Amino acid sequence: MANNKLPPEQHEGILDIATHAVVADIGGTNARFCRINLATFELDRIQVFPCADFPTLTDVMTAYSQQQDVPLEHVAIAIACPVDTDEINMTNHHWQFSIRNVRKSMRLKTFVVLNDFAAAAMSIVTLKPSELKQIGGGKITPKAPKAILGAGTGLGVGHLITLPNGNVMPLPGEGGHVDWAPTNEKEWAIHRFIQNRFGRVSAERILSGPGLETLYLALADYHGRNVAPLSAAKIGQRALSGIDTLALETVNQFFESLGGFAGNLALNLNTYGGVYIAGGVVPKLLNLMATSNFRARFEHKGRFCKVAEAIPCFVITAEYAGLRGVGQYLKQTIEQQNL
């Protein structure tokens, strides 16, 4: 780490000084594109595409370029899957592609691909205080490690560390796929229900949009009730309105499990820089999060409860944080390549 470089992200082409670039944040459900000014860091021409509407990544890239009249020269994308080789295979969608082949077929000068939660981690340094809602804990230690997690189509996890030169380095991983550990009788019943359905119970089976839907059915089974499946959006709406006690219990259980998981993540690197929660699920349910046992479970760490109590949690409320993280990563990469 003596040269203070970012880890070897997957990129193709010559990285040169550019004023504008196109960046994208691609999840299992939506692909968000925009143009970014790498000098001022302003975003414009933002457009969101449903992934299911396009057979391939290049199809949606072409659609964005044509509809927004933006040339594709320097492009960076964050994508919801491991980014370890030239071949990319999305975890929760069917897109597969070669980074090298995309750059050549689209005639791009630069094409950088990074894990979506590497981008989410990078976004932390771009956020304003008004774009963060603190949930317990003390003050951050600015240069200490940070953790980020987010529930959406899946469960993303990452960390961020500060290098001696002041740059930041994301540490992506697949922490959303670790085993989910029940802690009481109700959670053991939930575990058995999910295990019977899927064989293995990962954290993502609980802490995601689809996980919220499964959790609703698991709790109905626990109470001996026969209910029709509901979408995650409907469960959230019914819980917020107070018209469905099962939906409310589902959301509260979701936040309890999220708190335990986030607290475990905090202990992995002693993240005194904070734990940051992104994704599409939590910001919509903030009012219920405040009254849930999220923070109690976060801090329930036995002999290390004092450590957990000191670490603050934040919910990211910025709408396009992932896109800013991609831009920050690209800008830092370009600067380093031109040293």
Image: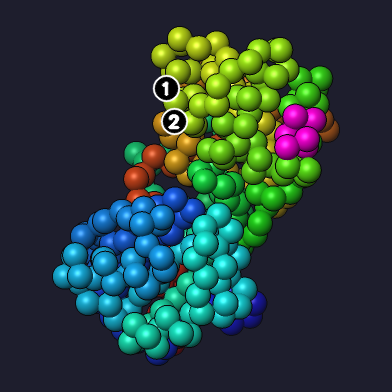
**Considering the numbered disc 1 on the image, is that residue within a helix, a strand or a loop?**
helix
Q: Nearer the viewer, residue 212 or 311?
A: 212
**Spot occupied by residue 121 in the image (x, y as percentages of width and height):** 51, 56
Label 2 crowding class (10 Å Cα cut-off): few <14, some 14-19, many 20+? some
Is residue 42 highlighted in magenta? no
Range of residues picked out in magenta: 192-197
Disc 1 residue type (three-letter):
Gln
The part of the image, by quadrant, that contains residue 39 is bottom left
Asked whether, in this view, residue 320 is left or right of residue 211, the answer is left
**Spot occupied by residue 3 in the image (x, y as percentages of width and height):** 59, 82
Residue pointed to by mark 1: 237
Q: Nearer the viewer, residue 77 or 19?
A: 77
Figure check: 296 above or below 263: above
Q: What kind of secondary structure does the magenta stretch mostly adopt?
A: helix
Could you tell me which residue is drawn at 63 percent across and 15 percent down?
A: 226
Could you tell me which residue is drawn at 57 percent across and 31 percent down?
A: 213
Q: Evaluate if marks 1 and 2 touch, with contact meaning CB atoms under 8 Å apart.
A: yes
Image quadrant holding the C terminus, namely: bottom left
Figure check: 225 above or below 91: above
Q: Which mark is residue 17?
A: none
Would you say residue 265 is visible in this rendering?
yes
Is residue 194 highlighted in magenta? yes
Would you say residue 273 is visible in this rendering?
no
Disc 2 residue type (three-letter):
Ala
